[in-house]
Amino acid sequence: MSLKSDEKGIILIVDDNLDNLELLFFILSDSFTVLLAKDGKSAIEKVEEVNPDLVLLDVMMPGIDGFETCRRLKAQESSKDIPVIFMTALSETVDKVRGFNVGAVDYLTKPIKEEELVARVTTHITLRKLNLRLKEQNQALQEEIRKRQEKEEELRLSNQAIAASHNGIVICDARAPDMPITYVNPAFEAISGYTAQDVIGRNCRFLQGKDTDQPALAELREAIKSGKSCTVTLSNYRKDGTHFWNELSVSPIYNDVGILTHFVGIQMDITERKQAQEALRSQQQQTEELLLNILPKPIAQQLKQNPSIIADSFDEVSVLFADLVGFTEFSAKRNAKELVELLNVIFSSFDQLAEHHGLEKIKTIGDAYMVVAGLPTARADHAEAIAKMALDMQQAIVKVNAETGTTFSIRIGINSGPVVAGVIGLKKFSYDLWGDTVNTASRMESQGIPGAIQVTAHTYERLRDQYLFEERGIISVKGKGEMMTYLLKGRKSQLYVAS
């Protein structure tokens, strides 16, 4: 059975709950080709038969659960690259880490929201199709390169046995002083711009121009001295002074009694190839620099060495969320260019602070900013570092207001604890955090006070000896219930000196 011609994308939904299957089928069937399975065993069989573009997999199922089903799919060559999204009511960090470890690319938490479901499925199917297309193009390119290399080698061998070629041919007398040129073919004249009359009787070194100290020349001289073959790439110059790259293959010619009489050189103008290689190196460097702008350096290095799912657990970090108070009202009175320029000023100052304090910026969403201390490299002072960042952000907003005539304030929330961090995406990478610590930090910001820094008791306990706090009291936090929170006012030493 082959459904791969279906451009809509094929989704296999695996759930032992018939109501869930019907609901998901109803949501997705208009945009995708949807197949159903009620357990892990039938899901594995259907994947082998159909090879879908994505698997939506329930975690809690009788028999083979979702984790084991995913592990078996990833263990098979035919299905290891199919993206798997878990659907689960489990929200513990350890469960999510387990899911990522067995090969899942994403999580959907039950009850599933339709908009989130469609968005994530669409994203991962698009990435899947782009990845397959890139793999096909890469295979075609590798085959083309292999064939081209074979043809170049065949051409090189055949040119040594014939007197004429589209490559330049030079024959030098090995018995005469300074090994003068005795023959050049028309291709040599076309490549170099010199006529046979210009070069007969001269040593080939005139082609080097000013580049007489090339490393490849030492290899060439040693091969000539030893009467052996060699291939080198030389920087040469044409008669009109223009530069070209010359791939030169030199072979000795012996007479019937074993005496070296001549050297034959086959020249190939590889200037375009060298330019293409240089362009490729430049593109690779730009890609690496871009990757470092998107991901932390250790994560980028790990991704380059092993482009698989990256997910790590960190026991102790501090997470900060910040939001510009008043920006929504301000944006209604400004054009897009002014808004982007102002956000760039503000977030660039935050980025500089994050770099100064050794923190990792995670992302910006609209006028919100997220940064973390303690990953990807663990640090014992993560809470203190994030506190310094928060206080400096308040000062940065004061400075921006003074310079731009705006009246923004910033609402900041901080929490400390364990998180899961990982890279999401196969083509467009994103480094993000998950876990209760992150959710609570977000609540500290959204339910905070404009102009204030609200922290949880976990963060307060880590900072109480070095920083001054005001007890806000117990507040009701969405999804957490009642929580004691505190407002960070500043460093104790600074306040005491001021007083």
Image (cartoon, rainbow, N blue to C red):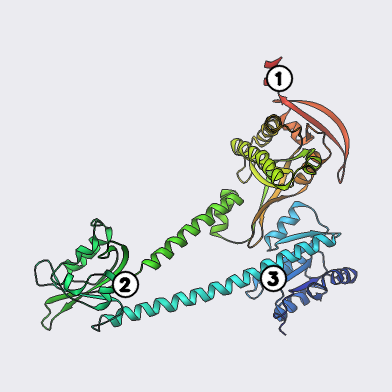
**Residue sitting nearer the eye, 388 or 137:** 137
Q: Position of residue 238 (x, y in %)?
A: 27, 65
Q: Residue at x 36, y 77 (%)?
A: 152
Q: Which residue is mark 1?
A: 495
Circle 2: element type: strand
Q: Which residue is mark 2?
A: 268
Q: Position of residue 449 (x, y in %)?
A: 82, 33
CA–CA distance between discs 1 and 2? 75 Å
Give the left or right position of residue 458, taking residue 176 as reference.
right
> Image quadrant for the C terminus?
top right
Q: Position of residue 404 (x, y in %)?
A: 69, 33
Circle 1: element type: helix
Q: Residues within 10 Å of mark 2 (few under 14, many from 20)?
A: many
Q: Is residue 67 visible?
A: no
Q: Is residue 190 above or below residue 479?
A: below
Q: Is residue 142 visible?
A: yes
Q: Residue at x 17, y 70 (%)?
A: 198
What is the quadrant of residue 476 in the picture?
top right
Q: Residues within 10 Å of mark 3 (few under 14, many from 20)?
A: some
Amino acid type assigned to the residue bearing label 3 in the image = Arg
Amino acid type assigned to the residue bearing label 1 in the image = Leu
Question: Which of the marked residues, 1 or 3, is nearer the chain's N terminus?
Answer: 3
Q: Position of residue 40 (x, y in %)?
A: 77, 72
Give the left or right position of residue 208, taking residue 431 as reference.
left
**Residue sitting nearer the eye, 239 or 358:** 239
Q: Which residue is mark 3?
A: 72
What is the quadrant of residue 110 in the picture?
bottom right
CA–CA distance between discs 1 and 3? 60 Å
